Amino acid sequence: MPSRTVSTFVSLLVLCLLAAPGHGQSTGGPIAAPALAPATGANTRPLSLADAIALGVQNNLGVEVNRYTPYVAQYESEAAWGAYNPLFESDIQYGRQREQNGFVTNQPTKSDQIEGGVGLTALIPYWGGALTLDFDGGKNNTTNPIERLSPKYNSGLTLGINAPLLRGLVWNEPWTQVKISRLGYESQLDNFTTSVMNTVFSIINDYWVLVARQEEVRVAEKSLESNNALLDQARVQYDVGVVSKVEVIQAEAGVANSEFNLILARNEYMNSQDQLIASVLGTQLHSTTTLLFSPTDNPVYTRAAPVDLEKSVERAFKLRPELAAAYKQVETGEISLRFAENQRLPRLDVNVRYRTLGTTGSENEVDSPFCPGGGVCPSPVNKGDFGDTFGYYYGQGGPDELSAVALVSIPLGNTTARKNASKARIQLRQSKSQITRLKQDIIVSVRRAARGLLASAQGVEAAERRRIAAAEQLRAEQIRLEHGESTPFDVLQRERDLVDAESQKIGALRAYRISQATLQREEGTILNDRNVVIDQVRALN
């Protein structure tokens, strides 16, 4: 009998035995395991990539932690303005004095005095000066004949201004802190945007990884199914005396290896489920969680347009929040340098005060030796109570005072201020160098992302060509089997090649989609492209 006829006869016999009911149900079969690909079930939740991002930016614990940082910086910035809140101060005191022999009359005297005051002090923004407004008043009852008024009421209103002309002019500590804290708040907004961009990219990556892991489970199950069929074929062939026991043992080893790969694939799939649940739902992942996400988006390939590297880098320079934060760090350094250089100057302050007074009261009933002819002095002109003192502030010849004082302070050596200025100058240069380095890193990362996108697109096309070739090889092998020129073993090998090619294409599509997200992240457009509004994300619930 010709060899081709024998091969055809054996192949037909094997196919008939494989089709027999109950065939292949041996105790050494594959390990039973539940299918993990989430398609239906009460604990399965369909999830699109857009929904995953929308849920993730609200529930992700990393975003939740970073969401508070800008608010803390905002309160710090607003608190810096507290240095310019007016300061209210007041005091009140009471005094009593008794003397057995007065200094002039050699007679006992006594006096009771109560006085107090209130005042407001406020720093002037930007300039660095301070305004003061003080009001004071008092009442004095005395038997001292020198005093013509008893009780005597007095009050005064003082307006003052202290202005620095050198050190502290503009670049004073309160105003410097206002500007630096404001830049710190804006920088924290940039940092929060950076963290959200990273979170969105991470969710995209986790989503497509889950899709790939789900496909790997399918491939592993298909491989186990193929190897079980091969084992059944080898046993039939061994029963009819076509193959040796060695080939059956080899087929059993292949089944065991497929079972092992399926266990690993299912484990990685569940790990990917947990990772995506944690990224998307945050604290809703518990030790007893049975939820499974069923991705509804497929990594369909659409040919990407060529990347214009010059425009891409320019866009990254404009939109990357890391670069914006670095520029604010330079602004902070410039402010710190100006403040430090200002502190090297001598102190020259001008203090101007204007005070107006008012005094009223009643005539002192004690005889005074200073009055003409002795006895009680004539009644004073400014009779009245405490409220009448206000009428003498401006007009009626009321007393007033004007003073101006210049204060000069020159530190000898001034070592601390000089070294602080040198340190601030070096730190500013360091911040500028960091911007240069960051720009260079952005150029490298954008070029790498663009190159990765092109490579992944070519990988998808290559994987598709392999899949088409594998499908064609399987079709040809099936035709050869029909004509007795092949064996079921060869057909199963071609089927396995096709499954591997399909799995490779899925992996290539995953890499392509992640490469797209990588380029969006490096250009700084990922939030806009994914419809994420940063102000809505950072809003507190």
Image: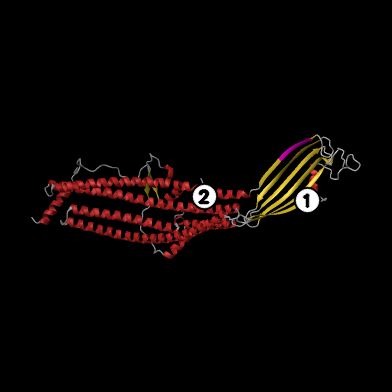
Residue 274 as seen in the image, left or right of residue 261: right
Q: Is residue 101 above or below residue 496?
A: above
Residue 119 or residue 41, whichever sits in front = 119
Q: Amino acid at mark 1?
A: Asp
Whether residue 73 is visible, yes or no, is yes
Q: Residue at x 30, y 60 (%)?
A: 462
Classify residue 328 as left or right of residue 406.
left
Residue 87 percent location from the top left of the image: 66, 46
Answer whether residue 533 is visible to the viewer in this image: no
Residue 203 is left or right of residue 489, and the answer is right
On the rendered image, what quadrant is the N terminus found in?
Answer: bottom left
Q: Which of these two is toward me, 331 or 281?
A: 331
Q: Assess whether residue 222 is covered by the magenta stretch.
A: no
User: Residue tagged by mark 2?
Assistant: 70
Residue 37 location in percent, x, y? 33, 46
- Find out whether residue 95 is within the magenta segment: yes
Q: CA distance from mark 2 to mark 1?
A: 52 Å
Q: Earlier in the sequence, mark 2 or mark 1?
A: 2
Is there CB contact under 8 Å for labels 2 and 1?
A: no
Circle 1: element type = strand
The overriding secondary structure of the stretch rendered in magenta is: strand
In-front residue for pair 471/116: 116
Residue 163, horizontal then vertical, whole percent: 67, 54
Badge 1: few (under 14), some or many (20 or more) residues near its Cα, within 10 Å? some
Q: Determine the secondary structure under disc 2.
A: helix
What's the magenta region? 92-98
Frontmost of labels 2 and 1 is 1
In x, y percent, where is residue 156? 76, 46
Decide: is 153 above or below 530: above
How many numbered discs? 2
Q: Residue beneath label 1, please?
A: 400
Disc 2 marks a residue whose amino acid type is: Pro
